[in-house]
Image (cartoon, rainbow, N blue to C red):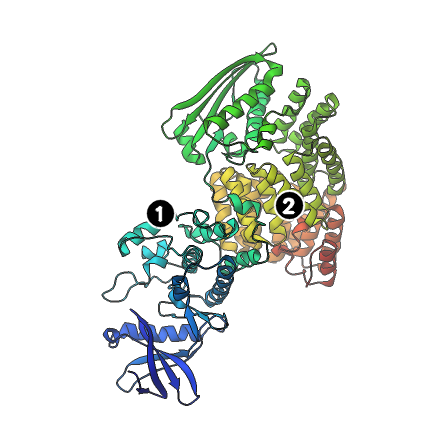
Amino acid sequence: MKGEIVSHYKIIKKIGGGGMGVVYLAEDTQLNRKVALKFLPPDLTRDTEARIRLVHEAQAASALDHPTICTVYEIDQTRDGHMFIAMAFYVGCTLREKIGKGHIGYEEALYIGVEIASGLAKVHEKGIIHRDIKPANIIITSDKRIKIVDFGLAILSGQTRLTLKGQMTIGTVNYMSPEQARGRTIDHRTDIWSLGVVLYEMVTGKHPFRGANAQSVIHSLLNDVPDPIMNMTKKIPKGFECIINRCLEKDPENRFLSMDDVKESLQRLQQCDPGDLLIAQEIVYEKKPSIAVLPFSNLSENREQDYFCDGVTDEIIHVLGHVDGLRVLARGSVFSLKDNNLGAREIGNRLKVEHVLHGRVRSSDNRLRIFVELISVTNGYTIWSERYDRKMEDIFAIQDEISLAIVETLKVKLLGKERNLIGKRPTGDIEAYHLYLQGNYFLNKRTTAGLEKAMRFFNQAVEKDPSYALAYVGIADTYTLLAGYEVILSIDAYKLARKAVLCALKKDNSLALGHSTLAILLWEDSVKQQSAEQEFRKAIDLAPGLALLHHAYAEFLAALGRYEQALVETRLAIELDPLSLISHVLRGFIYYLMRHYDQAIKHYYSVIEMDPNFIPAQCELGMTLIQHRKYDEGIETLKKATELSNNSPMYLSRLAYAYGVSGDRKRAREYLCQLEQLSKNTYVSAFSLAIIFLGLNDKEQAISFFDKAFEEKHYHILMLKTEPLFDSIRSDPRMQKLLEKMGFSTH
């Protein structure tokens, strides 16, 4: 075609081509500029569906206005009916050509990734899926700009038309997502997968999924795990590899939620020193030996010794949770299987661990007899066992010996600080230790009565041993929970909690639980967000395997609007505590904060399937349904939560809010009167009253009570920046002032 005139374009030369089109460089004789003309291949010229797709491509690309999207000028046809698209021509090279010259450095790959993600986010915003993201469709211009081209396979989200006549699944198999390769309904997450492949190829020079032919490549992408990037190059930060791995999750549910989230994660890496990696990102994808320490059985005739058996289990979990090279299931998950009489294999399947530790305890007349066995889930064989027949005061030595034996049997390398921790004695007073274990036993019941008993035992423990740092942490945690349950005024509880935890850390600064509790209290102080984050990071550094640390840090990150990091931390918490109902609720709550209500509702329902009577799941589901304007469903769900809570003021207020926003102001005011009467005799938080006024659209009263809630240091006021509940009043100057008081930028 060289030299031919097509419409007002003069063909200069062929510059590219493939199964879906042939591209020529041409000169626009009217506007005196270089353009690219894309024609259908000769064999598809008369194919009606192919012609429709070419029109569709022009429409899709021309509907987009973004610096990274190739500009489309027009669609036309030659006199003999050959259709073509006229597009901008860019001087430069394709990413395919650049990779061919050698893999790309970290900073440049990061820049290219951000630009591609930015463009695709705009594409997805229009409901379009590109479906053929690959290096050949990315142009790097001579002035280093990135351009996404070739929308020939683009479809609207939810469509499944993946083939043309006479063809198998279309697209480039090396960059196809698993769901695309299977011919299933796809959405924007298929482009997230393809971008992950492109990122991987940029930094390694290799495809993550390889094979001799298309079928073997598809088999690889459906079944194989890519070779770790860190094994091929040490110049790529672990955080970048984690982002790539997240894009390449075979289950779309486990990928980034949106291309915007990919972009923001990459941009955060751009702003960091390559060596300054998020602790959570460093361990998300590491394969570690895993173990579930099951609740030790009480063989004593005295049932009151249950607290001791539970305590021994807790202590071993706690110590092993400090070992970075080991994944230890958290208390919540293992205790949920207590008395279920399940076999090792079934437990392993439920908890996704390779080993389980069984223990039996008999205590009598200051003597202890403990038998433990470590079982391989794979074959059910005992790989280590031991029997201890000692005095009660030897309990610390026994726990250390068990922990060290597990570490050595599973061939986990101990760091110096971890070995020192295993040999550390929390107290020299065995009676104080028993009091502490009883305090923990009642603390873990998470009831008002249990918390009151826990406080009594923790105080008795520090009376017996004033140097018992962990007991002070127990006191602090109990006060924090009493505030969270709105049993006592938050500001009073936090003062007492802070005094206790500072005392604990003064006695032992290596307590991960102490640093985590201090982080929560600093966070409650609003303006000390940076100090709070430092404490969270310090706690996780000390004990990366403790689920509750990741859970607490995730809540903090969510409140700041750092949703992707919060989801990473929540995934870690759930990996360590897969049966934790509250961590699954938190994952749903983060989606709720992101305004992805359908995703949030899905997660809440999964928790309710596990336990229909779990109040936080019912409450958060109800509030999400209300924000989603599904008022009838939301009210019914909040009714159930309120009934389950025995008409707790905290849940009554949510129900009243729901009635108010749904239009039943009379019912909302009835609940308001009920709570105002109740407040004369018991504590009702200002926050609970504020949200009722918010539901009644009485903004004056609502803002007044939110101010009081801030003075009270109520936990939920910390969500002011992100909680959808506040959307209707967040822009009010008084709320903006409150945000500034809390250290949030209002610009």
Residue 87: quarter of image: bottom left
How dense is the environment of label 2, judged by Cα within 10 Å: few (below 14), some, or many (20 and up)?
Answer: many
> Quick check: 113 above or below 399?
below
> Quick check: 313 above or below 104?
above
Amino acid bearing label 2: Leu
Q: Pick whichever of labels 2 and 1 is earlier in the sequence.
A: 1
Quadrant location, the C terminus: bottom right
For discs 2 and 1, the disc positioned in front in the rendered view: 1
Tell me the SS state at disc 1. Answer: loop
- Front residue of 517 and 274: 274
Quadrant location, the N terminus: bottom left
Q: CA distance from mark 2 to mark 1?
A: 51 Å
> Quick check: 116 above or below 624?
below
Residue position for label 2: 652
Amino acid bearing label 1: Asp
Residue position for label 1: 224
Res. 83 in view: yes
